[in-house]
Image (cartoon, helix red, strand yellow):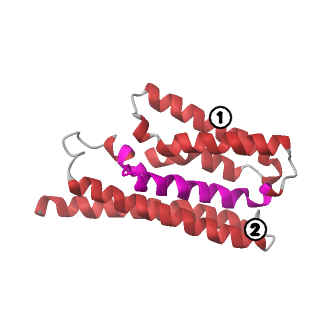
Amino acid sequence: MSYLRTFLPWIVFAVIPSAQWQWAALAGLVVAAAVILQQRSAGAAHDALIIEIGSALYFAVLAAIAFSDPHSGIRDYSATLSSACLAVIAGTSLLIGKPFTLGIAKRSTPPEIWPLKPFIRVNVVITSVWTAAFALTAVVLAALAHGGHGHSLASLLVQIAGFVVPMVFTVRYVALVQSRAPRA
């Protein structure tokens, strides 16, 4: 559930028709802000909100561009930019040693586990997979947009796969690691 909440602004943005991209960007911003406020009220630390904070910043900039110039060429590449932004956020979290999934995992893991190397390593792997999925999604979406199919069914399916594949990996990988933990 926490990943769904984390990526809810992006899901909202993706399902609003591209002809309404200004409103989609604004909706993404509103949802991101609401998620941040709700999670902070629930006691979530900032490190558990890396994607949400980055999302709010991205959608604020995109909404400003979209409302100031609704016919901007950026519209055609908005899905590409979204995935690229997520890749940058996730990749940066790895580079600074705070994988975005670490904060999410801490929500459901006892504090005594947090500093353990296997816990951190698992989150580095998971965040790496998410980063790669976002980057690959951005590349495929760029190719589709360049070919005039940036807002097609194929584009939507690529966006969905860009979230579903790493989500399934995360669930399965965590289950695998947990199944092996008692034996270790």
Give amino acid for label 2. Ala
Can you name the residue that lies furthest to the front here?
A: 96
Query: Image height check: is 105 above or below 45?
Result: below
Q: Is residue 1 visible?
A: no
Q: Which residue is mark 1?
A: 30
Q: Which residues are magenta?
A: 74-103
Q: Which mark is residue 51?
A: none
Q: Determine whether, in the image, residue 18 is placed left or right of residue 28.
A: right
Instruction: Give the residue displayed 68% in from the left and 39% down from the top.
Output: 60
Return the x and y of residue 101 as percentages of the image width and height.
40, 50
Can you name the residue that lies furthest to the left here?
A: 183
The answer for how far apart the CA atoms under marks 1 and 2 are is 26 Å
Quarter that holds the C terminus? bottom left
Instruction: Give the residue displayed 18% in from the left and 41% down from the top.
Output: 112
Query: Image height check: is 37 above or below 86?
Result: above
| Pointer 1 local density, CA inside 10 Å: few below 14, some 14–19, many at least 20 | some
Query: Image height check: is 70 above or below 42?
Result: below
Dot 2: element:
helix
